[in-house]
Image: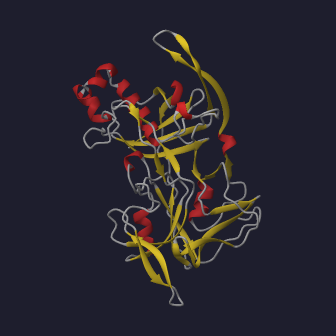
Amino acid sequence: MTTVLLRPVDTWFFRESRPMDAIGGSELASVFPPSPRLVLGALKTRLGEALGADWQQYTEHPAAQEEIFRLIGDGSDEEGRRGALELHTLDLLYDANPLYPVPAFLLKHEKTFARLAPGEPVDCDLGRVRLPVLEPRLPGAKPPEDEWLDMQAMNAVLGGGLPPDGKLIETKTLYRIEPRLGIARNNALGTVRESMLYQTRHVRPDHRLAFAATLSGWPEHVPPAGLVRLGGEGRLAAIETADPVPTPPAPVPRADTCGLVLLLATAADFGGSWLPPGFTRETRQDGTGRPFDVFTGTLDDTDFRLVIHSACLGKARREGGWDVRANTPRPVRSLVPAGSAYFCTVEGVPLADAIRALHGRRIGLETRLGRGRLFVGLWNQTHPTSRGNTP
C-alpha cells in the first residue's frame, strides 16, 4: 500500500453535478470533499506523467504504451481496461488528524448531544417498521451541519456514546468560500464568447488541510511527489508521500449491547437503492405478536446474516463527472451519503466476530474507488446522556 497526501496550492473547484450551461442565474457550487473518482483520476495523471506518457498518442492508442496502460487503464470501468491502480481509502486530514462526517443518528442542541435509536414498530408509508426516535428527548435538537468528528469523538460515538464537548470541527475552520465570475473563451480565435458569463464558488482550504489517499498498485520505483491538477479550472495540488492514516479501532461489545450500527464513512453506491445489495424485506413479530418489517441479508462473502431494524440516512449525494474515454459527461448517480447508518442485529455469529469481519470493509459498487467504507459501532440498550461538557 502507498499513502500520498494532496495539499492545496491555490483554491479548488470541485464542481457539483449540475451542468455548466444549466445553472441559470445561480452560482455553480463546489462539493466537499471531492469525488474519489476525481482524486484517483488526478493520481493516475501524476503516475502517467512520471512514467513519461505521451498523452496525445495515449488518447488514441492507450494500449500501445503497455506499462502505463497496465497501471492506469484508459478511463473505462471495464475489467482489464481500468488499470491496476486502486483507491482504498480517502481521508480528510486537518493538522495531520483525520476527520469524519457526523453520523446521521447524532443530533445536537447548542453543546448538548443525543442519539437516535430504533423505536417501537409503527405503521407508516414504509409498512410497519421501527423508525428512529430520539433517546433521551432533547427539544430543539437537529443534525449538526457543516461539522466533522475528530478521531476521539468518532471513537466515543462508535462505542455507543456521545462526542466530548468541543470535539466537532466546523467546516469554516477547514476552508473559505470564494465566489468567482468568469466568461467562456473561443480558444480557436483567442476571443471571449458573448453572453457566456458564469459564476462559480471555489473553496480556499486552510494550509493545514490535506487529503490522504491510500492506494494499491503504485509502482515502488516511481516517486509520487509533484504537482497535479485537481478538480476544475486547472487548480493545482501538491503530492507527497505520507505514513498510513490510522483507522478508528473497532469497539468491544458491552453487556447491554443488543446490536450493531453500520456507519458509512464514505458515500456508497447501492445501485440506486438505500439498502445494501442482497437485502430483502422480511416480516417478523414483536413481543406482542404483532407483525413488523425488517430487512435481512448478508454482506459480500460473510457467513452470517444481518437484520436491519432501522436506518438513519442523509440527503443523497449526486455525482457525475467526465468520461475521458468517451469524451462525454458521466451519467449522474445518486449515492447513499457518508454518515448514513443502519441499526442491525446479527444472526449466526457472536457480535465480536461480526465486528471484526465488517469494520473497515468496503461494500456496494465501485469499492475500488473507496466507496462504501464501513465503520462498525455499538447499538446499546442504555441511552447515553450529554450535558454540555460531559462525554
Residue 243 in picture, x, y percent from top left: 48, 42
Q: Can you tell which quarter of the image residue 105 is in?
A: bottom right
Q: Nearer the viewer, residue 243 or 101?
A: 101
Is 236 left or right of 296, judged from the image as shown?
A: right
Residue 181 in picture, x, y percent from top left: 64, 24
Q: Which of 124 and 39 is in front in this view?
A: 124
Q: Residue at x 34, y 32 (%)?
A: 326
Q: Which residue is drawn at 48% across and 51% down?
A: 335
Q: How is the image coloured?
A: secondary structure
Above or below, 203 relative to 266: above
Q: Can you tell which quarter of the image residue 33 is in?
A: top right
Q: Which quarter of the figure is the C terminus placed in?
A: bottom right
Q: Which residue is drawn at 69% across and 41% down?
A: 172
Count of numbered circles in the view: 0
Above or below, 147 relative to 313: above
Is 211 left or right of 217, judged from the image as shown?
A: right
Q: Can the viewer see residue 64 in this picture?
A: yes
Q: Can the viewer see residue 235 in this picture?
A: no
Q: Nearer the viewer, residue 205 or 216?
A: 205
* The residue positioned farthest toward the top in the image shown: 189
Q: Which quarter of the figure is the N terminus placed in?
A: top left
Residue 291 in picture, x, y percent from top left: 49, 84
Residue 251 in picture, x, y percent from top left: 52, 66
Above or below, 22 relative to 347: above
